[in-house]
Amino acid sequence: MKLTDYFLPVLKESPADAEIASHKLMLRAGMLSQSSSGIYSWLPLGLRVLKKIENIVREEQDAAGVNEILMPTIQPADIWKESGRYDDYGKEMLRIKDRQGREMLFGPTNEEQVTDIFRRTVRSYKELPSLLYHIQWKFRDELRPRFGIMRGREFLMKDAYSFDLDKESSRASYNKFFVSYLKTFERLGLKAIPMAADTGPIGGDMSHEFVIISDTGESDIYFDNRILNLTNIDENIQYNSDLSTIVESYQDLYSVADDKFSEDDFNLKVPEEFRKHTKGIEVGHIFNFATKYSEPMKANVLNSNGKTVPVHMGSYGIGISRLVGAIIESSHDENGIIWPNSVTPFDIGLINLKIKDFDAVKICEKIYLELKDTGIDILYDNKDDSPGAKFSRMDLIGLPIQIICGKNSVKDGTVEIKYRNSGDVKLINISDVVNFIKNK
RNA sequence: CGGGGCGUAGCGCAGUCUGGUAGCGCACCUGGUUUGGGACCAGGGGGUCGCAAGUUCGAAUCUUGCCGCCCCGACCA
């Protein structure tokens, strides 16, 4: 993509409305445009990142054997009345009426909707376990939206749902998501800590939040520092094998959010040198809630004895739009964003400092086209701006690798490769650039 | 929802106390000179001062009501 063709409204100054780093940087880097409180439009650069994250989450759900579906944003009130949550949910739920006066709502979550799909179609235990997910916009009319996209009213979430015959099998599904979440966050360049959590209004008896450490987080977290050293999930993990050993290795180490925290427990279970208390951002949450919805909504199957039983369910969320902000919170400096390779909007930023020099333009065009041909996402700054403006803009938008072409490129036949995270610069012959980048 | 703050050009702000022709920086447009860390000179365009009503000869400025946005708290599958 050439910058002259790209819609990238960067700002020199932070808008007065923004307070935390990710919010400021997203506005300054031209990723977002606010529509109203807690509701945003995604501009090209932001949308690229959102989609990258969405795709990684999708790939990992698919790898874990979860089926993608797409449920509506607008739901009928009826099913929520059946589950009992129409009255319980409160003002956070945006209630609307259609022209016939039918009660509808903009979905804050989809337990009822997915349970309805399930009960219409599944009759036998032989169909179980059944795992479904979708990636869809949600709306919760938060009392006080804040921190830009991190706590918006409209947000993109991946939510998955499991249906099992009994508690044991349901636990296996839970473990599957537990492990796949660890792997997903790893791929996003984040260290997410699973924390025992309260189940809240959704109910049930087992729940973990996945939290990343950040000063701007909304929750206080307490954990055994050794949880950060547990080994990564194997690339080729078999999701149908017994995952309880992995899950238990995490659960054995103390880690809870403030709602479950107890000073005594903490001191008793964690040696002093490993006790850690910080702020964190919740990026995922998994629940097992047994038959809370299947019973009132009559989501039943026949078991092997021919008896009708309610299915055991769980739900598993990842805040996709929130992750964009969370990643920036954990990866930026005073000059701007520093994207992890896996979610960067472009792999390479090519800067031409000599836009009026025919030879320099020729060199850049060649590098641009050749890299593009190899499938690398490249943003080519071909604008007629001063060098300082180009450097600071490229630093701001945070692409991991910059290729800088200036007077030396024409004179000595070299370009600079600059790494955004370290600031390291190395000179490379123009003829070697494409191979160098390709082999990274 | 309790407390606090803000709303003046695309963005950041001054002007409001003490009423009297709406300003600054950046951005933008034109011409010229520049070109390795947010260039310079000259010229130029752009504002129902959030909305409404009131007071006044006269309101960005005073009064009342409303709307919007932000921050702290409470809240947050």
Image: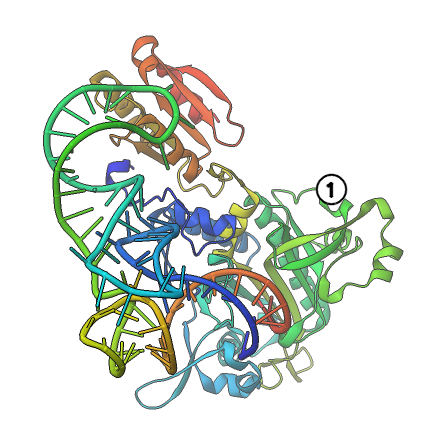
The image quarter containing residue A200 is bottom right
From this viewpoint, which residue is outermost toward the right?
Answer: A268
Location of residue A63 in the rendering, given as x and y in whole percent from the top left corner: 54, 52
Q: Left or right of A50: which side holds A185? A: right
Identify the image quadrant of the N terminus of chain A.
top left
Q: Nearer the viewer, residue A19 or A440?
A: A19
At a point 69% along the width and 73% down the height, the residue shown is A166
**Above or below, A416 relative to A378:** above
At a point 57% along the width and 50% down the height, the residue shown is A184
Residue at label 1? A229
Location of residue A174 in the rendering, given as x and y in whole percent from the top left corner: 66, 63
Q: Nearer the viewer, residue A127 or A427?
A: A427
From this viewpoint, which residue is outermost toward the top?
Answer: A412
Q: Nearer the viewer, residue A126 or B36?
A: B36
Can residue A239 be seen from the camera position used here? no
**Above or below, A297 relative to A69:** below
Can residue A236 be seen from the camera position used here? yes
**Above or below, A362 relative to A24:** above
The image quarter containing residue A428 is top left
